[in-house]
Image: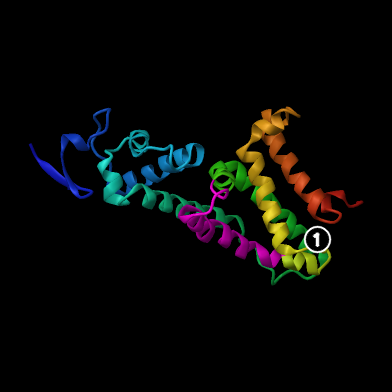
Amino acid sequence: MRLIWAGGIYVSQEGLRNSRGRPLKENEVAKADLIESATKFFSTKGFKDTSLREIASDAKVNMALIKYHFGSKAALWDEVISSLSWTVLQTNDFELDHVEDAFEMKRLLENLFDRLVDMSFEHREFSLFIMNETVQQGERFDHLFNELIQPFHDQTYPFIAKGIEMGVLADQHPEELIVMLMSSVAYQQAAPHVLAKFTAVIQDEKQWRETVKRSLKVNFIKNPCDQEPK
């Protein structure tokens, strides 16, 4: 029987086959699948209630590869958050240099809000991590803050501050508004069952998404463009 070194231990070549008997995936593919499965379980079940065995089973790879690629459960969690951060930060690629007046600023902010909502629908795990992992402070919160919340804030702040300065947004503390934007969008995705008690709008995702976008605009932007007389 041939033994292979994986994750600090020797395992048999047969052991490095998934439950369906398929050959072991290439290392990078297996790593990506582990991150995807870990993201799903960590975001929905939480860190403590998620086992490495169920992550490996869902990814259809041997559990030894978790140790090989990440070293530990905590390191895998860190990698999940770092990977999600890269995805989330693609939301904002706007530039302020070309904004010349309040109307252009208003359009930019509306597009930014729309992308934030789209991101929250397409990556519900962002909302789940924001709502579930920010309640208690600790190492996981610190990593979440440094990798996800702080970069989101730093990327968004110039646009919010400029919007307030130009009178497109009401005069307020920009930090408060950023946290409010993030939490209001995240809460709906993390706990849609609460909204479902009041309205059936969530049954139609397209309508629900457009409803959230409109709500953000009319509540935060002065006279949104789609509200202005033609």
Identified at 82% across, 62% down, the residue is: 168
Quarter of the image containing the N terminus? Answer: top left
Three-letter amino acid code at the position of disc 1: Leu
Identified at 68% across, 35% down, the residue is: 206
Instruction: From the image, tell me which residue sits under label 1.
Output: 169
Residue 107, percent across and down? 76, 58
Residue 150, percent across and down? 57, 61
Element under label 1? loop
Residue 25, percent across and down? 28, 41
Determine if the magenta segment contains residue 4.
no
Q: Is residue 27 left or right of residue 199?
A: left
Residue 204 shows in the view: no
Which range is magenta? 133-160
Mark 1 Cα within 10 Å, few/some/many (few <14, many 20+)? Answer: many
Name the colouring of the figure: rainbow
Q: Is residue 128 left or right of residue 40?
A: right
